[in-house]
Amino acid sequence: MGRAFVYVILGGGVAAGYAALEFTKRGVSHGELCIISEEPVAPYERPALSKGFLLPESPARLPSFHTCVGANEERLTPKWYKEHGIELVLGTRVKSADVRRKTLLTATGETISYKILIIATGARALKLEEFGVSGSEAENVCYLRDLADANSLVNVMQSCAGGNAVVIGGGYIGMECAASLVINKINVTMVFPEAHCMARLFTPKIASYYEDYYQSKGVKFIKGTVLSSFEFDSSGKVTAVNLRDGSQLPADMVVVGIGIRPNTSLFEGQLTLEKGGIKVNGKLQTSNNSVYAVGDVATFPVKLFGETRRLEHVDSVRKSAKHAVAAILEPEKAGEFDYLPFFYSRVFALSWQFFGDNAGEVVHFGDYSGSTFGAYWISKGHLVGSFLEGGTKEEYEAIANATRLQAAVEDLAEVGRQGLKFALTV
Ligand code: FDA
Ligand code: NAD
């Protein structure tokens, strides 16, 4: 049993949706493009799962957040794929790939062949078991990567209103879920090994603003330690979390956000990997000419930094997907992918954006006791990264622009005094 397509996108997440839209914009014939996804639904905006989806009032539900609404573009419902002659093979896991033969074998036993493959398999959530702790299978231990996880998180949350949640991990999932849990009137304790939250990006000063804000909402922080085990009741539900420092926290539910691993395993030994992802060039092309990789799974050259990076944020996913399609359909016209890294988050009434790289020396600016403040990262006399909380559209554009231009900085203290004015006058 088998089918053949010109283009196959493996994975049906954010990248797949944006790639599909770009294919139709640039011209693809009916029956040429196929998307294969393990998930049972058409591509959707994954960021909604830790924000709108978890709200107690009028929560976001599909079909409202199918791609590409996150970039204010068309909403691609299953009907849209049908009308555009794009084959959506949902609820189907690809269990092996042969890049020499240009075939994919699905768990249902079908062989799907391609002329051009776009790998968009994203990433999976790391499990506690990988850190030597068992209990992930308990019904009140939640992860958050896909719609099924989000549905079970909502069910668990609703079953313990007014109860206690322990959030494991102080990264994006930890911070965004903690805020959503508080909004759902659940008492939250966050536990993570670092000295402050969002350690991969925030400086201690930035982190302390958010931690104070969370504390004002009732969140407790236990830092510098990790969990060692769970206590269970007779039905197998977790009742408490034991920490390595010897303390114990009562828990009606647990949310785990301890990082991800890119889904590269189908291609190990077949394609070149780098920094945990599938290595691609400026056209998003892998070490095999017929295979492209985009989104969380791809390690691509960031021109601005002169090195390769693997990013885990939706803006780079959307843009890398679009660029790959341009490079496939119009190889002469499409230049090299030239991307300015952009990360953001929104929690409670807060909202921040970050552009570039958090390398070099840091200068903080603005009012850290108010609602608008930020930081610049300066390396070798140039601005390489910028962060802003509570900015306007124009201010975010200004820090993005100054970072892209790698504005020259002579006097760090002066830049700190100027704050936003520095970016606005570049
Ligand atoms: P993505 O993970 O979206 O999709 C991969 C797809 O491939 C899935 O459908 C999966 O089932 C499928 N797949 C994998 N292996 C397969 C196989 N063998 N066979 C078939 N199908 C397979 N970023 C940001 O910038 N701002 C934000 O606010 C957020 N918020 C956010 C919230 C939550 C809850 C999560 C989990 C993530 C975010 N992110 C984010 C990160 C962002 O969502 C992430 O970078 C993108 O979803 C990655 O898009 P991809 O398409 O690369 O993978
Ligand atoms: P993360 O990498 O942001 O954070 C992982 C956290 O796990 C670390 O901060 C650390 O505190 C913690 N940790 C590591 N080892 C631990 C251990 N043994 N015990 C306890 N804690 C430990 O990853 P995440 O928060 O799981 O997010 C998953 C993915 O989703 C990431 O790719 C992230 O970029 C993405 N995401 C992004 C956004 C956004 O951009 N706004 C929002 C949600 C999710």
Image: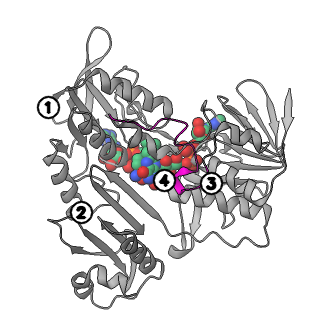
The residues bearing labels 1 and 3 have C-alpha atoms spaced at a distance of 43 Å
Left/right placement of residue 423 relative to residue 365 reads: right
The residues bearing labels 2 and 4 have C-alpha atoms spaced at a distance of 21 Å
Q: What amino acid type is highlighted by mark number 4?
A: Glu
Give the residue displayed 36% in from the left and 49% down from the top. 172
Q: Nearer the viewer, residue 53 or 34?
A: 53
Left/right placement of residue 237 relative to residue 28 reads: left
Find residue 312 and name its label: 4
Q: Is mark 4 within 8 Å of ligand 2?
A: yes
Instruction: Say which label, 4 or 1, has the lower sequence index.
Output: 1
From this view, report whether residue 160 is shown above or below residue 278: above
Residue underneath mark 3: 294
Residue underneath mark 1: 247
Callout 3: SS: loop
Residue underneath mark 2: 206
Instruction: Say which label, 2 or 4, has the lower sequence index.
Output: 2
Give the residue displayed 36% in from the left and 40% down from the top. 257
